[in-house]
Image: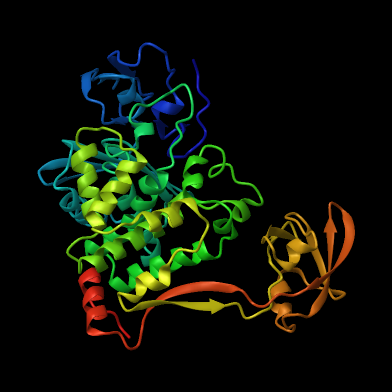
Amino acid sequence: YRIYADDLTVRTNHLDDSHGFFTGAALFFYVPGYEQCPLTLTVIPPEPTWQIATTLPLKEQETTTGAATFYAQDFDTLVDSPVEVGIHQTFDFEVAEKSHQFVVWGASNLNGKQLIEDTQKIIETEAALFGGLPYDRYLFLLHLAHQGFGGLEHKNCCVLNYSRFGFREPEKYQRFLQLVAHEFFHLWNVKRIRPKALEIFDYDQENYTPSLWFCEGVTSYYDRVIPHRAGLATAAEFLDLMSQDITRLQTTPGRRVQPLSESSFDAWIKLYRREAHSNNNQISYYLKGELVAFLLDLMIRAQHRNQRCLDQVLQRLWQEFGQPEVGYTEAQLHAIVGAVAGVDVEDFLHLALQTTEELPFDSVLADFGLKLEVKTASVPCLGLTIAENRGQTLVQFVYQDSPAQRVGLEPGDEILALDGFRVGLKLEEQLRYYAPGDTIALTVFHQDALQTHSIRLDPPQPVSYTLVPIADASPEQLALRQGWLGEDLPA
């Protein structure tokens, strides 16, 4: 059979005149009843000079054509072993006497020497957390194109997609290191430590679990933590990233609608099928899960004066479920969190996972001499975002319970005038001349019909949340904070 391969993502297939990439779930037939049968995969490159990269063990290779046959012990292994064929840069290196390789496709401004040095630090830091590396060889497949961002974990490799020119600017390079840390962390958390619903892969139907907040959220938290521990980011940079993530959560109306456990359970039908109102009715289990992990880490640290933390939860899960590859239930996960915390955490977990109540940032942060500094917008709230499209100023998003939503404005409406004057993309700038409670006349095209709405403006809304040290922190607060971050913060 033939496959249309023109989708360069980490989970699909892509073929052009320089490479071919495929992932098993998007390519191979699933044949019921043959899941446990050993399989061979023969790859015939179009040119004998093309290289083949995969974690499947090589069975035999034809030197004249470059064709190679690989072995998979079962269908799960085949599906979990992506293959990259083409003209590549390769970087070989060792960590803890284990073999590692970066296979890089695409021209870029990547500094290979720095990439390897920094990746080694990330691997060493994560290996120290879990007590070693559970493989003989690990492969990083890196695709570099003009745009794109993403990663997908596999048991002994990962696939990364990044912008080809995203390596020279410090902020963009840090984002790439976080991606590496995230996908590498998954070789423990998800590929080996996984929920009961994912213990045995069911290829006939969706696999639902309420635990993706832990699978992805905890991993997202550690992709911030690991570069800091590895000496690749300062404490201030780490806290800045956490501030950005708190801002994203607190400015997403969907946090007041969808509980975190439901976000996890609904992943198949919601998270990757976004529509115009998604931010109003859902929350990402990556994002909120990360911040729940952040608070759990601090709560455990405060209880045990930094002698315990979220690390010990992961270590217990690794020993009891990851190494034997037995799935955990939600109750077993909660029990381990509680045992490490040494206190009853069920009330917090219920609030964080099952309700839409606000997370208790202030009370948890106070133990570490930190607080959230809230910045509000400088203009009254209209409650929408806009963007230009082919010369038109269009509504992109309308916030739930906002003035714009109350009068019926919708995504796709074209903004024409404010109080009779053309406004375009200067809408926010023009709102500076109004005060909360003022009434404006906003003229729009709604489905090609000219409409003018009378809108009463709300007070300015929060736009950012920043973690800052409190001015009069006690010695106990300072000790906790320094024990956590490993360094003090500037005032």
Specify the farthest residue to the right.
450
Which one is nearer the viewer's eye here, 197 or 25?
197
Q: Is residue 224 above or below residue 107?
A: below
User: Where residue 311 sits: x, y (%)?
Assistant: 23, 55
Between 76 and 24, the residue placed more toward the observer is 76
The C terminus lies in quadrant: bottom left
Q: Quadrant of residue 11?
A: top left
Q: Please identify the quarter of the rendering in which residue 430 is found.
A: bottom right
Going by the picture, which residue comes out furthest to the bottom? 472
Q: Is residue 140 visible?
A: yes
The answer, for residue 104, to whether it is visible in the render is no
Closest to the observer: 148 or 37? Answer: 37
Query: Which residue is drawn at the image coordinates 42% and 52% (left, top)?
Result: 164
Give residue 162's position: percent from left, percent from top. 41, 50
Decide if residue 152 is on the left or right side of residue 65.
right
Q: How far from the left and from the top, in percent, is residue 102?
A: 27, 43
Q: Tell me: residue 13, above or below residue 102.
A: above
